[in-house]
Amino acid sequence: MASVATRPGADDVSDAPLLDARSLRKCFGGLVALEEVSLTLGRGSVTGVIGPNGAGKSTLIGLLGGALRPDGGAIALEGRDITALPAEERARLGIGRTYQIPRPFLDMTVEENLEVAQAATQRALRGTERRRRRRELLERTGLADVGARGARELPLLRRKRLEVARVLALEPRLVLLDEVGAGLVDSEITELIALIRDVAAGGVTILIVEHVLRLVRECCSSLLVLDFGRSIAAGDPATVLASDDVAAVYLGTAHRAPAPKVTETAERVPGTASPHADLSCLVGDAGPGTTDAPLLRLEGVSASYGQVTVLRDISLSVSRGEVIAVLGANGAGKTSLAHLISGSLSPQSGAMEVDGRDMVGLRPDQVAQLGIAHCMEGRRIFSDLTVEQNLRVAARRVPADEVERRLTAAYGLFPLLRERRLEPGTAMSGGQQQMLAIGRALMSRPRLVVFDEISLGLAPIVMDRLYEALGSLRAAGMTMLIVEQDIGRALDIADRAYVLEHGVVALEGPASTVRADPRLRHLYVGTAD
């Protein structure tokens, strides 16, 4: 349990906590997203919640804000049970939240956005008084000079400020900040830290769910670390971030068994490939390029989502038969890089080539025709298709006998899929759906597969099964680019690795060299040995 003393300057000096959440549990189908998590927030405290992808952070903030209902546990605000109250009722009681992607009313001015927020809690005030409070709030959040401008015109940092200002217009007692640092450069983080400190100095209790560790380190008096839906550490930021156990969670070594070895006599992990499975029909031809030229080359590539630059000057290469790991903390740009390679994100500058052919500007279907398959984060299983239909959809316009050969190979890689082939694709567990997503990507017989976060939200034993399958594909000669949060597993299988930080390549080299580099830990938790 994370417990924080009241900060000096808080209006209420009572020893009783402002918010007390006990044994929270939340499930989505068969996935336990949060299990027995407790959290106590003192008045005026600033608490951070951190953890890798799939740890349960967003689920926790959804439960506290009222967007989600818990399947177990209770939440009390100043001793009052609010577990069943919806988000709008909690807002009236003084709980406000922001979102990772700012959601202002784009067709309204900045000040009009605050006026809408005031309508929920300040109806009894005269218009002149509400106007005065808006102007004070604009001044306080650094928006006084843009109050009359449309929200659509604001750059990202100003939108983040507006997101905070709208929450403060509710006059909350508790503010839930959901990844307010996402997409910001270091100088903007500095400004955001100053704003959060100012809000906290006014006595507002703050809970920060964040991936930018500098922000939680400099703003928070207490940290709670989640992993696989459970609380694994709590305490002051310096102690928590220096913990080897916390570093192991971020570096993917906390639950990992030794890398499985595939040999002629090896005992097979249930549900995955037989050592004798013939996977050659799933591996695309090397193509016309020479063996020393890279199959994929990126040179000086930058890309953005609207106002947010997510990749800066990226240079990367993948040779035939090579396995490349792309690593980095949450928000580093890993998934954006995967979308860039598969054509769903367009570069703003730089060169991208497959076998020396320019691929800039190609649509995702055109990139797929060049032999690049993208096994996307989140699996993206077609819910109205069976397991086998999901597999067949990736082999359209392929002769029937060749489709059958590929199906046989896919079922050899994941025998469980054969057993479930007539069931709906989404009726299976998360790990089984990930097997299906991998099998579907392979059915196009790609020359390069981009695997994006295939371990996300899965239990360690299921990750072991998936990585045993990737080991079999590597042995068959498959070229792979593995975007992964689990550093240990990715480096076990990779030849080389690139580590991203804030959209740039911060570390690269042979997998063994990257693993031994103390900068790797620093890039994840900011505490290199």
Image (cartoon, grey):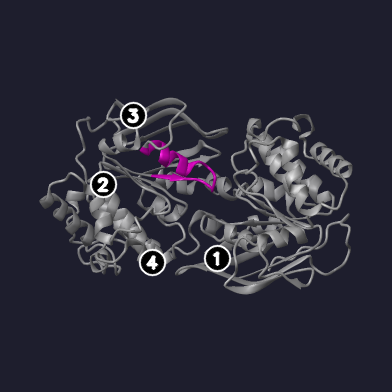
Residue 177 visible in this rendered orientation of the protein: yes
Q: Residues within 10 Å of mark 2 (few under 14, many from 20)?
A: many
Residue 258 visible in this rendered orientation of the protein: no
Residue position for label 4: 429
- The first of marks 4 and 1 along the sequence is 1
Position of residue 487 measured from the top left corner of the image (x, y, whole percent): 46, 52
Give how far apart the Cα atoms at labels 4 and 1 are: 17 Å
- The first of marks 1 and 2 along the sequence is 1
- The first of marks 2 and 4 along the sequence is 4
Under mark 1, the amino acid is: Gly
Q: Secondary structure at mark 3?
A: loop
Q: Secondary structure at mark 4?
A: loop
Under mark 2, the amino acid is: Met
> Which one is closest to the eye, mark 1 or mark 2?
1
Q: Where, by quadrant of the figure, is residue 353 drawn?
A: top left
Residue position for label 3: 359
Q: Residues within 10 Å of mark 4 (few under 14, many from 20)?
A: some
The residue under the point 41% across, 40% down is 339
Q: Which residue is more in the foreground, 323 or 54? A: 54
Q: Residues within 10 Å of mark 1 (few under 14, many from 20)?
A: many
Q: Are marks 2 and 4 in contact (CB under 8 Å)?
A: no
Q: Secondary structure at mark 1?
A: loop
Give how far apart the Cα atoms at labels 1 and 2 are: 34 Å
Residue 458 among those drawn in magenta: no
Q: Where, by quadrant of the figure, is residue 40 drawn?
A: bottom right
Position of residue 151 measured from the top left corner of the image (x, y, whole percent): 67, 35
Position of residue 81 measured from the top left corner of the image (x, y, whole percent): 73, 72
Q: Is residue 339 above or below residue 35?
A: above
Give how far apart the Cα atoms at labels 1 and 3 are: 40 Å
Under mark 4, the amino acid is: Ser
Residue position for label 2: 478
